[in-house]
Amino acid sequence: MNSDEVKACCADAYSRDVVAMLLGDSYHPGGTALTRHLADTLGLTPGARVLDVASGRGTTALLLADIYQVRVDGVDYSPANTALAQGAAQAAGLADRAVFVTGDAERLPHRDGTFDAVVCECALCTFPDKAQAAAEFARVLKPGGRLGITDVTADPGHLPPELTGLAARIACIADARPLDEYTAILAAVGLRTLATERHDQALVRMIDQIEARLNLLRITAPARLAAAGVDLAAAPAVLDAARAAVADGVLGYALLTAAKSP
C-alpha cells in the first residue's frame, strides 16, 4: 500500500461514526483538557492565526476559536470531516473564526508565513512522510511562530505484533516514533523544541474508555461494529497489548512545543 492509499484509508476510518462512538468528541488522549493545556503552553492570544492540521470534525479548532478568540484554519484529508467541521462551526456561530478545507498535511494548501501557530494533535504519527509534514509546518509558520503537538510515542522495534500493521497505523500506533525522533525531525526543518511533557496516563485512560465503549457497543450495536470492520474477537488482545506496552515504556503520549527561528 503506497502512502496516498495509507492516508486515504486513515481518513476514511476517522470519518466513520463508529470512531466517534469509541473515542468521543476528541479523537485523542487527554481530550479537550489537554488541548487547552497545549493552547496555554503556546500562549495563544486573541486575533492570532492558527492552523489545525488533521482537524477532523473540528473539535480542537472550534475550542480554540471560541475560548481563545483566535482565527483557526482547519485542514483534513477527509472531505466528510471537512463538511462536518464546517457545519459544526456554523451551528456554533463560529464560522467567521473557523474555516475548514480538505487537504494533505504533506502539501498544505496555505501560503508561506501565514500562521502565528500550528497545532497537530495525534496525527503526525499517522503521516507516512513525517519529515515532509514537518517541513510544511515550518513553511506556513511566521518567523517566531510556534508549533504545538500532542502525539503517540513508540519504540517501533519493541512493539508487540498486535500493535503493528494497517489497523494499528490507523489507531496511531504502528508508525509512531520515540519522542527524541520527533524533536530531531522538527530540528531538521528549523523548528526548535521548547518543551516536552509526558502524558502516558492519558493514553491508558483512552484505552480503558475504548474497552468500555466497545463492550457496550458489542451489546447495543454489534452490526455497526461489524460493518466498520471492528474485529471483536481480536480487540481484547490488542487493548491488553497496548496497556502492557505503556507499562513497559514502549508506548506513550507526549506534548511538544517548538518555535520557528525569528
Image (cartoon, rainbow, N blue to C red):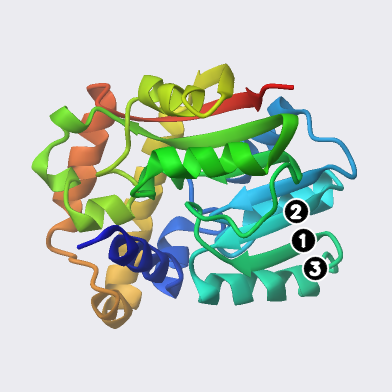
Residue at numbered disc 3:
92
Asked whether disc 2 touches disc 1, contact meaning CB atoms under 8 Å apart, the reply is yes
Q: Secondary structure at mark 1?
A: strand
Q: Nearer the viewer, mark 2 or mark 3?
A: 2
- Above or below residue 239? Residue 257 is above
Q: Quadrant of the C terminus?
A: top right
Label total for image: 3
Q: Secondary structure at mark 2?
A: strand
Residue at numbered disc 1:
98
Residue 110 rendering spot, x and y as whole percentages: 67, 55
Residue 238 rendering spot, x and y as whole percentages: 18, 48
| Number of other residues with Cα within 10 Å of mark 2, as a class: few under 14, some 14 to 19, many 20 or more | many
Mark 2 or 1, nearer chain start = 2
The answer to whether residue 127 is left or right of residue 40 is left
- Which residue is drawn at the image coordinates 51% and 53% (left, top)? 105
Q: Amino acid at mark 3?
A: Ala
Residue 81 lies in what quarter of the image? bottom right
| Number of other residues with Cα within 10 Å of mark 1, as a class: few under 14, some 14 to 19, many 20 or more | many
- Which residue is drawn at the image coordinates 62% and 76% (left, top)? 83
Residue 103 rendering spot, x and y as whole percentages: 54, 64
- Which residue is drawn at the image coordinates 20% and 63% (left, top)? 1
- Which residue is drawn at the image coordinates 24% and 39% (left, top)? 242
- Above or below residue 85? Residue 166 is above
Residue at numbered disc 2:
72
Mark 2 or 3, nearer chain start = 2
Q: Secondary structure at mark 3?
A: loop
Q: Residue furthest right?
A: 47
Residue 45 lies in what quarter of the image? top right
As measured in the structure, the alpha-carbon distance from the residue carrying label 3 to the one carrying label 1 is 10 Å
Asked whether disc 3 touches disc 1, contact meaning CB atoms under 8 Å apart, the reply is no
